[in-house]
Image: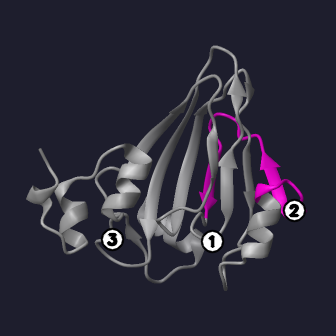
């Protein structure tokens, strides 16, 4: 899979790999009783490759482009309280490749059950070069922030790292 192929599929002229060392290419592992709560991505686009499904649950649910032109708080509220008719549910099978605009589409992984974990490879892309998450966002998602997160936020990294 090349960046050119992804760029052409998304029809984007300005397109860069996410420069965040914690989130540019990851394998997400979700175990029984977990999922991933409703959220928007920090990066613009993701490419996911389903590797292994859980025994039950773990569907990918999304409300496409509800944040495209505004924050759209009314529709976000409907998604969160379960009354939106814009939510689509996908059961991605191992080998399925998905291109997704996660910055604009509210999405989650539904809770799963069973002993078999869910594995998904995720590659992230952005529209601005050298973009990384804010320190707060990195800590929220990964439990830590690296010097690059603080530097890009204009903060002294050594003031926050043990």
Q: Secondary structure at mark 1?
A: loop
Q: Quadrant of the C terminus?
A: top left
Question: Could you tell me if residue 1 is visible in this image?
Answer: no
* Residue 159 screen position, x and y as percent: 11, 58
Q: Which residues are magenta?
A: 80-100
Q: CA distance from mark 1 to mark 3?
A: 17 Å
Q: Position of residue 20 (x, y in %)?
A: 31, 59
Which residue, given by chain and number where applicable, does mark 3 sit on?
131
Residue that numbered label 2 is attached to: 84
Give the class, few, some or many, for how many residues have Cα within 10 Å of label 3's Cα (few <14, many ≥20). some
At a point 82% along the width and 58% down the height, the residue shown is: 87
Q: Which mark is residue 104?
A: 1
Q: Determine whether, in the image, residue 132 is placed left or right of residue 97.
A: left
Q: Position of residue 75 (x, y in %)?
A: 79, 71
> 3 or 32, which is in the foreground?
32
Crowding near the residue tagged with mark 2, few <14, some 14–19, many ≥20 C-alpha atoms within 10 Å: some
* Label 1 Cα crowd, 10 Å radius (few <14 / some 14-19 / many 20+): many
Viewer-nearest residue: 114 or 51: 114
Q: Is residue 140 above or below residue 57?
A: below
In the figure, 125 relative to 56: above or below?
A: below
Q: Is residue 3 visible?
A: yes
Residue 14 is inside the magenta segment: no
Instruction: Give the mark count.
Output: 3
Classify residue 161 as left or right of residue 124.
Answer: left
């Amino acid at each position: 899979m090349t960046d050119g192929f992804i760029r052409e599929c998304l029809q984007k002229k300005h397109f860069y790999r996410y420069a965040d060392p914690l989130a540019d290419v990851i394998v997400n592992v979700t175990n029984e009783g977990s999922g991933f709560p409703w959220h928007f991505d920090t990066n613009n686009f993701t490419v996911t490759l389903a590797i292994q499904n859980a025994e039950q649950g773990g569907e990918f649910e999304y409300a496409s482009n509800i944040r495209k032109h505004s924050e759209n708080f009314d529709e976000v509220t409907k998604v969160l309280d379960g009354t939106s008719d814009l939510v689509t549910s996908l059961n991605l099978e191992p080998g399925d490749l998905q291109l997704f605009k996660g910055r604009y589409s509210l999405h989650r992984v539904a809770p799963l059950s069973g002993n078999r974990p869910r594995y998904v490879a995720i590659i992230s892309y952005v529209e601005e070069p050298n973009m990384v998450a804010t320190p707060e966002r990195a800590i929220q998602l990964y439990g830590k922030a690296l010097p690059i997160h603080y530097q890009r936020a204009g903060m002294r990294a050594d003031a926050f790292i043990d």
